[in-house]
Image (cartoon, grey):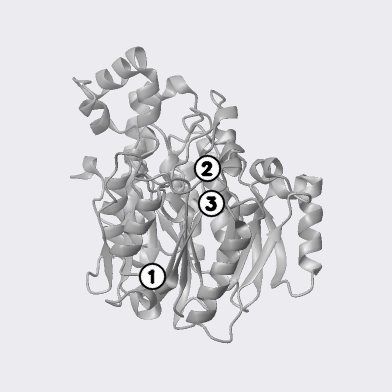
Amino acid sequence: MSPAAEVNFDGLVGPTHNYAGLSAGNLASMSHRGTRSNPRAAALQGLAKMKRLADLGVPQAVLPPHERPALATLRALGFTGREPDVLRAAARTAPALLAACASASNMWVANAATVSPSADTPDGRVHFTPANLASKFHRAIEPAQTARTLRAIFRDATRFVVHEPVPAGGGCGDEGAANHTRLTPRHGARGLHLFVYGHRAFSAGGAAARPTRFASRQAFEASAAVARAHGLSPQQVVYARQHPAAIDAGVFHNDVIAVGNEQVLLYHENAFVDSRGVIAALRRTYGSLHPGRTLTALPVPARRVSLRQAVRTYLFNSQLVTTETGGMVLVAPADCEEERTVKAFLDDLLTAPGCPLRAVQFVDLRESMRNGGGPACLRLRVVLTAAERNTLPPGVFLTPSRYDALVAWVKRHYRDRLEFSDLADPALLEESRRALDQLTTLLGLGPIYDFQR
């Protein structure tokens, strides 16, 4: 293994995976509202994707789901009595609140936090800032559990620091790594950090138009706060604004319209306001950090792949990874293979002069895709040295035997169908708690949930 490697921490899909259509601006989430979900299939598809990455030689680890329904949140909203009474009262009088408190959206851990590896920070520690996810209620209840989980895994304070989320309110939303890309010649080298935002919370931010259909979720101020908290030098940071037309087309996060890995950035030509200027700034910054090295920027023209096609297929929500042999592979949703024009573009990209991609592999994530999350949504990228990795609980890493154990765990505990009415079923809460209690033992995390304390 190299001195430092990027570990993909994938979120396990939770037992309450359902289609409540809670995320305005996420077209897939909105269009599947009210349909029946299959939590068992969703979790198994996610695990199969993890195994695919591990088989490519990409270090793979697991982040556990949050407890849902979130009874503590429902109680904070005024529901009282025994737990079955709370669930029934919420379903009867405030079904939208119950849906929000039962969402399994925490499986999309690209929104869990922003991460800076030790090679980039002045104190030589890996820094995490849990996202405040202030733009959506069902996600804004996640940060406390996210921080608790991260601290249980990255427990060595001499090597890791988990900050508090950026203060929310006033439009200062932070959506985590979904709006952050690190570019570097190799994972262990010093990195360039690209932070993408949709609006400024405290100033107009120039003459560029604002989105008119959907609201921006990421504030410039939140991105800048994360960079400051992590001690990143201004000489290694570039800020770019999302194009309002992209947001209105359903690009709610930058990872729906751009993906990077090591020295490569694949992006739609309409990803940013002034995409040419953004790429020029990235090239300058990259060159100053690594003299003699060149950033490989791969634009995707709108005439080849429209914004609508990019959103529908989640082409840019693919995982761009470096395999153990050093080649790059794009792990894309099966929807990209089925969309003729997108598949044709990928075929041409693989044969283009100077393209570093060696292959495209397609994965079936139908259950997650229907709710608005593709391969990249499901993973948080954490660059770790071998010494840093050795301080983590071994149970979080995906090995062949642990994959088999997790598959058996899902089949034992997850339902194969879920409708909205099931969210008020006290049995679902008990099933979920039994599952999570066993999971924390399997992963070696100890008691991280309120019900375990």
Residue 56 seen in render: no
Label 1 neighbour load within 10 Å: few <14, some 14-19, many 20+? few
Element on which disc 3 rests: helix
Picture quadrant of residue 185 = bottom right
Q: Against 227, is 249 above or below?
A: above
For the residues labelled 3 and 2, the Cα–Cα distance comes to 7 Å
Q: Which mark is residue 234?
A: 1
Q: Viewed as shown, does residue 82 lie left or right of 424?
A: left
Amino acid type of the residue that numbered disc 3 sits on in the rendered structure: Asn
Residue 417 seen in render: yes
* Residue 21 percent across, percent down from the top left: 50, 28
Q: Earlier in the sequence, mark 1 or mark 2?
A: 1
Label 3 neighbour load within 10 Å: few <14, some 14-19, many 20+? many
**Residue at x-position 43% and y-position 57%:** 62
**Would you name the residue on which mark 2 appears?**
252
**Would you name the residue on which mark 3 appears?**
254
Amino acid type of the residue that numbered disc 2 sits on in the rendered structure: Phe
Element on which disc 1 rests: helix
Q: Viewed as shown, does residue 423 lie left or right of 294?
A: left
